[in-house]
Amino acid sequence: MTTARRGLVALAVVALVTTAGVGTTLIWAQEKESENTAAETRYLYISEFEIGPDQSFNEALAEGTKWVKIYRETGDFSSVRLYMHHTGPRAALYILLETESWQAIESGHAKWIAAMPDFFDKKMKFRSHSDNLLTEIDVK
């Protein structure tokens, strides 16, 4: 198997795993949202991008800043913020997206991808990436 083919297979596996995880989480969020229609449900979507060895902090910040601006332009999130963790076990960027509906998460991601048609064609310099979806629990 060629290196390019291995890269495509790896990307496909990552996409499937990510999609399955987000899909499962979104189904749970949908169920909780329908159970609590009277209560306001808030979601916090956190994307972590670990800075790679071939990437400077300034390059990482430039890329993260670009992505945050595109997320803000979608209009689907009540808050979009960029954080940098540069002490501890890793140097990483965190994009935090806050919204009141799981539909906004799907819509916002679709608009973000549409705004960057070359995203899947260019080489990523980040070492790793992960996403987390947090659902606020209304404690009274």
Image (tube, helix red, strand yellow):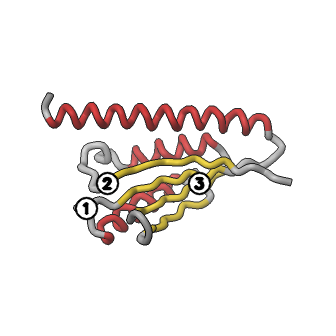
**Residue at 17% of width from left, 36% of height from top?**
4
**Residue at 41% of width from left, 58% of height from top?**
67
Residue 53 disc label: 1
Q: Which residue is mark 2?
A: 127
Q: Nearer the viewer, residue 128 or 109?
A: 128
Q: Residue furthest top?
A: 1
Q: Which residue is mark 3?
A: 77
Label total for image? 3
Q: Amino acid at mark 3?
A: Phe
Q: Amino acid at mark 2?
A: Arg
Quarter containing the C terminus: bottom right
Q: Amino acid at mark 1?
A: Pro
Horizontal side of residue 12 vs 98, given as left or right: left
Q: Residues within 10 Å of mark 3 (few under 14, many from 20)?
A: many
Q: Where, by quadrant of the figure, is residue 53 drawn?
A: bottom left
Distance of label 3 from label 2 (alpha carbons): 27 Å
Q: Nearer the viewer, residue 38 or 88?
A: 88
